[in-house]
Amino acid sequence: MFIIYALILPLALCVDRIFGDPKSRFHPVALIGAFIDWWGSPGKWCPGQQRVAGAAMWIVTAAIFAIPFYLAEQFLPWLFLLVAGPFLLKFCLAWRSLEEHTLAVSVALSGNIVDGRREAALLVSRDTRQLTDEQVLSAAYESLSENLTDSIISPVFYFGIFGLTGAAIYRAANTMDAMLGYRDERERIGWFSARMDDILNYIPARIAGALLLMYFAVRGRLSPAYVAFQRDRSKRPGFNGGIPMAILAGGAGVQFEKPGVYTMGTPERSLEEGGPEIISAVRAVAVVFSLAVMMVLLLLGSVTIYTGI
């Protein structure tokens, strides 16, 4: 099975780069999102029930989403799994779409600030109506930077350890956090989703950070990347998302700004100039980490065949 997984991973990345994320309400993540939206409404539960309901429904949602992936792994013949597996894994990650959403903000902004703000509002929860051009681009590139962990490194990490089922559980968990993990009326119903997302992303975020530091070391930008990592990683709420954001801002020589909340990096150049460097860094880390996981899976497969385990 390790050999099959090692083949599924690069094929899934190819599927992602070719097809991206089709916009359809029948996409598995969209379907599970509709289910989360149904049970995640605080009005469905009494205040005293919301924390327990959030935890219980987290388990139910993760199980519902993961069951088809588990059944495919357990019962599909290896050849059919090799064909279906890349598409199943693709549902759990989003690489091309991250770049497309970021570039869509840049293209909209080149038309006028109102369109840029409107496009940025699709990516972030902040109020974009008063943002400057640079702050609009910051919102887009912050989303890309944070989602290096959420949408690429973490799904590949859990696929490498637990197969398609692991990747599916992670994707369900991350979707629940994205929809419910806020300090507003959803705080009680979403508390468990937020905590589980923090736990599941803890190791992958640090892997992403280490690989980004290596990338900028090769680019001769280790010092500003590391300085920003030390200084800025804790400015963002949570203990995971600030790691890749700070390193990418420092390494690319740009500044991320959420007005009234934080700034990260040093503005050596504008985000219009430095944005392509952020995209290149994300691509490099995605490829290097995926190759590393693939090589480990191939090694484990070879050992299994040799020892007959």
Image: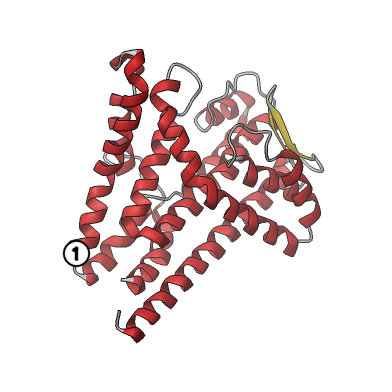
The image shows residue 142, relative to residue 154, as above or below, that is above
Placement of the N terminus among the 4 image quadrants? bottom left
How crowded is the residue under tag 1: few (<14 C-alpha within 10 Å), some, or many (20+)? Answer: few
- Asked if residue 215 can be seen in this view, the reply is yes
Q: Nearer the viewer, residue 165 or 254?
A: 165
Kind of element beneath mark 1:
loop
Quadrant in which residue 307 is drawn: bottom left
Q: Is residue 303 left or right of residue 207?
A: left
Identified at 48% across, 43% down, the residue is 199
Q: Is residue 203 left or right of residue 138?
A: left
- Asked if residue 95 can be seen in this view, the reply is no
Colouring: secondary structure
Image x and y of residue 280, in percent: 63, 56
Q: Nearer the viewer, residue 308 or 76?
A: 308
Kind of residue sitting beneath label 1: Leu
Image x and y of residue 122, in percent: 49, 30
Identified at 48% across, 73% down, the residue is 295
Placement of the C terminus among the 4 image quadrants? bottom left
Identified at 79% across, 39% down, the residue is 267
Q: Is residue 115 left or right of residue 36?
A: right
The image shows residue 252, relative to residue 43, as above or below, that is below
Image x and y of residue 257, in percent: 70, 31
Identified at 26% across, 43% down, the residue is 63
Image x and y of residue 308, in percent: 30, 83
Dot 1 corresponds to which residue?
Answer: 76
